[in-house]
Image: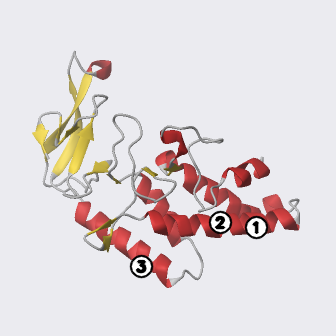
């Protein structure tokens, strides 16, 4: 199993959605569903957890190298807008690291979801390099900028909705902060996408 993980890693440090990678979006470096983050946590545990004391030294060294390469890949994938680092997309090109679309409702965007796991992983690194520190600080700054306040998402009965309900946004000054799943890279505004692949600025009946 460990060999399969190590052999599936690209030379640039990323992992595709599946191995061997196909010709579609499965070849992209995949942060979606925390795929790459979980792999990096796993290979780091190979070198640090007593659970894997049985692993031989050669595999430990290979896992350590894989982790370092993966972190380097993460830094290269961090999206820059107007020269400033922000967050990450759910998937990135395996050649030039640019954000890429996957399924019709997964556009090339800033991900308010996957970037949490990426940032948390970077924050867990002991004695981080200046590059890692800069990446974390930039991501945190982006999250502060992308924060949505004064609104709450609720379920409303709707016979046409999934399971008889529809999610709508209502004004609520006392609501805790929210973050959207997808943000437009250029405007930094939340977008919502269905299977038609058309980005919209609203969910339910409330304009964001």
Q: Earlier in the sequence, mark 3 or mark 1?
A: 1
- Residue 86, given in percent of the width and then of the height, sits at 33, 66
Marks 1,2: beta carbons within 8 A: yes
Q: Earlier in the sequence, mark 1 or mark 2?
A: 1
- Residue 142, given in percent of the width and then of the height, sits at 30, 67
- Residue 190, given in percent of the width and then of the height, sits at 22, 50
Q: Is residue 164 above or below residue 150?
A: above
The residue beneath circle 1 is 47
- Residue 130, given in percent of the width and then of the height, sits at 48, 84
Identify which residue is drawn at 25% across, 55% down.
176
Identify which residue is drawn at 40% across, 57% down.
98
- Mark 3 or 1: the one toward you: 3
Marks 3,1: beta carbons within 8 A: no
Q: Secondary structure at mark 1?
A: helix
Question: Where residue 134 is drawn, which disc sits there?
Answer: 3
Disc tally is 3
The residue beneath circle 2 is 67
In this image, 197 relative to 67: left or right?
A: left
Q: Secondary structure at mark 2?
A: helix
In this image, 205 relative to 113: left or right?
A: left
Q: Secondary structure at mark 3?
A: helix
Q: Residues within 10 Å of mark 1 (few under 14, many from 20)?
A: many
Instruction: Evaluate whether residue 180 shows in this view.
Output: no
């Amino acid at each position: 199993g460990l060999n399969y993980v190590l052999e599936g890693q690209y030379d640039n440090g990323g992992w595709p959605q599946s191995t061997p990678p196909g010709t579609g979006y499965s070849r992209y470096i995949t942060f979606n569903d925390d795929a790459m983050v979980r792999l990096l946590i796993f290979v780091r545990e190979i070198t640090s957890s007593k659970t894997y004391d049985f692993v031989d030294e050669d595999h430990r060294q290979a896992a350590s190298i894989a982790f370092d390469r993966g972190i380097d890949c993460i830094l290269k994938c961090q999206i820059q807008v107007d020269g400033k680092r922000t967050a990450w997309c759910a998937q990135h090109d395996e050649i030039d690291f640019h954000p890429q679309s996957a399924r019709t409702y997964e556009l090339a965007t800033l991900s308010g979801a996957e970037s949490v796991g990426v940032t948390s992983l970077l924050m867990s690194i002991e004695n981080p390099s200046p590059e890692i520190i800069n990446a974390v600080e930039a991501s945190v700054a982006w999250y502060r900028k992308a924060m949505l306040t004064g609104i709450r998402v609720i379920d409303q009965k709707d016979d046409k909705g999934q399971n008889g309900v529809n999610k709508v946004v209502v004004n609520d000054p006392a609501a805790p902060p929210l973050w959207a799943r997808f943000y437009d890279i250029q405007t930094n505004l939340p977008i919502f996408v269905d299977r038609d692949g058309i980005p919209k600025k609203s969910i339910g009946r409330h304009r964001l």
